Structures are given as structure tokens and as C-alpha cells.
Image (tube, rainbow, N blue to C red):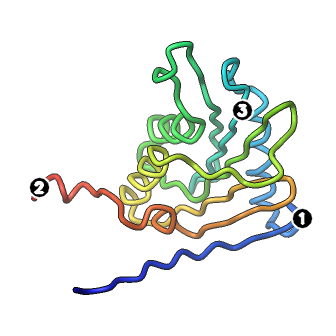
Amino acid sequence: MKKTQIITTVFEYNSIDELSLEEQELVRNAKEAALRSYSPYSKFSVGAAILLENKDIIQGNNQENSAYPSGLCAERVAMFYANSKYPDVPVKTIAITARTNGQFSENPIPPCGSCRQVLLETEERFNQPIKLILFGEKKIKIVKTIKEMLPLYFEKEMLDE
């Protein structure tokens, strides 16, 4: 038997003022996107903002449907749009925030497993890490690479085995 330990490093901040100006702008864009979410069923609005290597910012928000599986998370809306509009431009950072009951969440909300896989595929596609900013009004978490969020990930090479 072999034991392998997986360690994830998460940086925590108490205020948006502790972030760089670029990161603050990205969080503001994620919050703005959350305000435009279409989430009449869950009433849980999520916003994502992606900073591309070319400095463009792409926003996305969750889109629900009465046939629940037909909806899509904010992270995937933003990432798929970024990859379709700028297929050759790497993603530098993604910021994610959520609202419920008319208020932004106090604590950060992490992406679901499907979104983590999509984010990781983009990270692998461009062969460079994507920084993840998870914003909450009282706490902000930053992870330097999506692989930290999904350490035992499925990768395209596995399709060839």
C-alpha cells in the first residue's frame, strides 16, 4: 500500500480592500453579473467574472429553467462564452460570488464539481494556472490554480487508455 497526501492551499482575506485593484475590479464584475442572474426557482443568484490574458473581462451568471437540469451555472456560462469569443486567449483569473434573499453571501461559495471540471479543462487547454477568487462579504478565499480545487481530476489523456 502507498499513502499519498493531497494538500490544497487556500488564502483567506477579510476585506476586498486586501485584494489587488485588478482583483477588486473582477469581484465587482462578478457581483454585477449576479444581479442579472435568472434564478426564479432557487432564488440563489451566482455571478462569475473572468479576466483574460488580453485584459478583457467576461461575465456570466446562473440561468435556471423550470426543467432544472436544463439550467447552467454562472462559471460555465462565463467560461464557455470566453472560450467561444476568444478561443486563443488564456484565462488568467475567475471571481465568483453569490446572492440569496437580496444579499450577497457572507462566506464564499465554491463552484460545483461540473464547473470545477470545466475550469480545469480550460486551465489544461492553455497550460497555465487559473486563479480562483471566491468572494463573500465577510471572507474571501483565493486558490492559485483550479487543480487545487479538483486534485484527482479527469483529464483528456485518460480517454486514450
Q: Position of residue 41 (x, y in %)?
A: 66, 19
Front residue of 70/155: it is 70
> In the rendered view, would you say 103 is above or below 3?
above
Question: Marks 3 and 1, Cα distance to the nearest angstrom?
Answer: 23 Å
Q: Which residue is mark 3?
A: 45
Left or right side of 53 for 153 = left
**Residue lying furthest front:** 1
In the structure shown, which secondary structural element does the residue marked by tag 1 occupy?
A: helix
| Amino acid of disc 1 | Asp
- Residue drawn at x 80%, y 46% is 105
Image quadrant in which the N terminus is located: bottom left
- Residue drawn at x 73%, y 51% is 26
Q: Position of residue 130 (x, y in %)?
A: 53, 61
| Numbered label attached to residue 160 | 2
In the structure shown, which secondary structural element does the residue marked by tag 3 occupy?
A: strand
Residue 132 lies in what quarter of the image?
bottom right
- Residue drawn at x 70%, y 27% is 37
> In the rendered view, would you say 13 is above or below 110?
below
Front residue of 33/72: it is 72
Q: Position of residue 161 (x, y in %)?
A: 10, 59
Q: Position of residue 95 (x, y in %)?
A: 67, 52
Given this view, does label 2 or label 3 mark the residue nearer the observer? 3
Left or right side of 2 for 146 = right
| Amino acid of disc 3 | Ser
In the structure shown, which secondary structural element does the residue marked by tag 2 occupy?
A: helix
Q: Which residue is mark 1?
A: 17
